[in-house]
Image: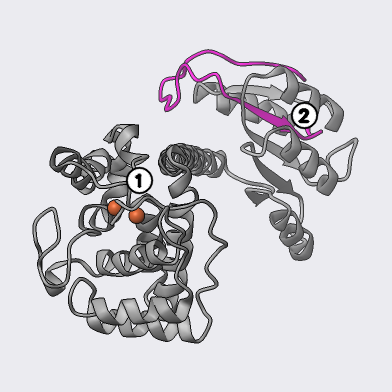
Amino acid sequence: MPGHALHDAGPDAGSTETKESILVLDRDPGLQFAFVKHLESWSERCLLAEDAQDLLAKMDSEPEVCAVFLNIAAPGMHSVDLLEAIGEKDPETAVVLMTDYLDPSLALSLLKNGAFDYIRKPFLFEEIRVLLHRIREHRALRSQALALQVLQETKRVERQNLIDFMIGLANVIDAKSPYTKEHSDRVALMTKAFTRHLGLSEKEIEDISFGAKLHDIGKVGIPDRILEATGRLSKEDRQLMNDHPVTGAKILEPIEVMRDIIPMVLRHHENWDGSGYPDGLKGEEVPLGARIVKIVDYFDAITSKRPYREPLPDMEAIQVLEAERGRILDPSLTDRFIELIRKGGLRQPKVSGVLPAVRL
Ligand SMILES: [Fe+2]
Ligand SMILES: [Fe+2]
């Protein structure tokens, strides 16, 4: 009775209404009959295949094939090839091999090639029922795992989109003025070298460097005329400028993946002696990442060209850093930073453009 399909609900159905099919390929008419009879009583949809080609054709025509019960000596194709062809059509279809005698090496190679299990003839149909139960459990777990994978991938893409958006925003701010061109890139690159030099963990290195890239993101709220100004700012404009750490933190606050970045954005203008803004935090009250970015941001400012002076060479920059050590800059971190400059580990990217006098 090849091609026989059963739809009737049986008395003890565990999977009524399912559209999944179970395919059986075995030339033994007695076994075919027994499969149809038992699967019908369990309300399963059972299709009998004549040979390997017929089985593959049925896999194409059936919406979903849950399991294939396959004689290891199936007519029409070697079982290893047939197993592969089934896997290509639907890797989620479970293949159970039925054997007249147990050849452990063949069984092992078939299992390695993706067979779900094998069963030795003669068997009790209760064993088939248990196998079907296991297959359904396995499929449920697989579909949960796949759903989780899709969810994780969606989250990863969303996270990456947010990161890309923020990086784009930081680049837009840099590009607003020819004086700040590539500033955030330089600060991020030097911060990465510095955090590595300090021997911080990979997570800290990534977070602090990303914070360095975004440290001035709050400048998005500052009018261009202030950003582009090259002279002294009025008191009001200075206040607007000084709001950028808080504005930046507010931009990032609602975004969960940005939480660890906020300290560098909010605190990069706090000073070691408490004279900075927005809150006048002192010493180690300022988070480590922000003290690091502060030093690098400061160094980039003094080694970049400004409208009224050339960039300071490294040796002069070191003198300025030493003068600010313990005043606006964390003293021991400054020592480590100077150490890094001296050993040539900073490799500051080429400075282009001029930086406005009002930046720091
Ligand atoms: Fe800033
Ligand atoms: Fe900056």
Query: Where does the magenta region start and end?
Result: 1-28
Q: Identify the image quadrant of the N terminus.
A: top right
Determine which of the numbered discs, if any, sits on residue 154 in the image. Answer: none
Gap between marks 1 and 2 measured at Cα: 93 Å
- In the displayed structure, 216 sits above or below 32; it is below
Q: Which label was assigned to residue 230? A: 1
Q: Which residue is drawn at 32% across and 76% down?
A: 320
Residue at left offset 64%, top offset 36%: 93
- Residue 3 is inside the magenta segment: yes
What type of secondary structure mainly makes up the magenta span?
A: loop
Q: Label 2 sits on what residue type?
A: Pro
Report whether residue 199 is seen: no
Residue 24 drawn at (x, y percent): 71, 31
Residue 270 lies, with reference to residue 333, above or below; the image says above
Q: Quadrant of residue 201?
A: bottom left
Quadrant observed for ligand 2 in the rendered image: bottom left
Helix, strand or loop under label 1 = loop
Please tell me which of labels 1 and 2 falls first in the chain: 2
Instruction: Tell me residue 45's x, y (percent).
Output: 59, 21
Point out residue 343 in the picture as x, y percentages from the top left corner.
51, 86
Return the residue at label 2: 29
